[in-house]
């Protein structure tokens, strides 16, 4: 295989892997029945005028399946952290005792679980669209190389088959992550 097609396929695999990682991160932020710090990984707090990830501003302690204590490193950020949590899509009402922000996650209702499953499916679909866009872009590169005479027809079709295999593997992996998240959400 020529260097051109090899580079295009490597770049495609790298980008598809990144889409899979983003899907995994997005799935981790969707709340299930249990409390865990990754639920807050995408939450931004207005920290002195700058949107700052909550993970950088506080430590987290999971007390039980539904209770999380968040202790801001800077006590001045307490109200900003509380506001960011209240405004988030987690559906929580934080309480503040001056030292820590306590969050008691409500039981997930059947309706809320279905909403989270819809959200998970939407994020999964976004990831699959990203993978397909990478495939289309790489296929265009391969087609152009064949047309320009940089590589032969046989090598072009071999590269396309390899690209299809890459795409299938990554889409299947995204489906697997989604299936796992749905099972987690349906677990009562």
Image (cartoon, rainbow, N blue to C red):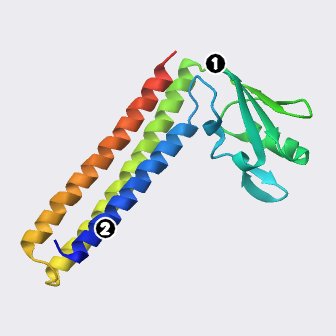
Horizontal and vertical percent position of residue 65: 64, 20
Nearest the camera: 65 or 43? 65
- Where's the N terminus, which quadrant? bottom left
Q: CA distance from mark 2 to mark 1?
A: 44 Å
Residue that numbered label 2 is attached to: 137
Q: Are marks 2 and 1 in contact (CB under 8 Å)?
A: no
Dot 2 alpha-carbon crowd within 10 angstroms: few under 14, some 14 to 19, many 20 or more: some
At x 54%, y 38%, the residue is: 28
Dot 1 alpha-carbon crowd within 10 angstroms: few under 14, some 14 to 19, many 20 or more: few
Tag 2, which secondary structure? helix
In this rendering, is residue 164 above or below 54?
below
Tag 1, which secondary structure? loop
At x 63%, y 47%, the residue is: 42
In-image side of 44 versus 163 (left or right): right
Residue that numbered label 1 is attached to: 107
At x 86%, y 42%, the residue is: 78
Q: Residue furthest top?
A: 188
Horizontal and vertical percent position of residue 51: 74, 56
Numbered circle sitting on residue 5: none
Horizontal and vertical percent position of residue 29: 57, 39
Nearest the camera: 164 or 65? 65
At x 41%, y 30%, the residue is: 180
């Amino acid at each position: 295989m020529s260097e051109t097609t090899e580079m295009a396929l490597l770049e495609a695999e790298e980008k598809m892997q990144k889409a899979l990682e983003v899907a995994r991160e997005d799935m981790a932020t969707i709340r299930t029945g249990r409390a865990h710090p990754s639920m807050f990984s995408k939450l931004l707090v207005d920290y002195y005028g700058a949107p700052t990830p909550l993970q950088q501003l506080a430590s987290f302690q999971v007390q039980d399946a539904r209770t999380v204590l968040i202790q801001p490193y800077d006590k001045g950020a307490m109200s900003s952290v509380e506001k960011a949590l209240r405004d988030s899509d987690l559906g929580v009402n934080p309480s503040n005792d001056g030292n820590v922000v306590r969050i008691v996650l409500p039981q997930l209702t059947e309706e809320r679980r279905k909403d989270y499953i819809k959200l998970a499916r939407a994020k999964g679909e976004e990831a699959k669209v990203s993978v397909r866009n990478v495939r289309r872009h790489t296929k265009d590169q391969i087609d152009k190389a064949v047309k320009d005479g940089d590589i032969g027809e046989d090598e072009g079709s071999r590269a396309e088959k390899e690209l299809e295999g890459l795409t299938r593997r990554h889409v299947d992996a995204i489906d697997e992550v989604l299936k796992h998240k749905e099972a987690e959400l349906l677990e009562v």
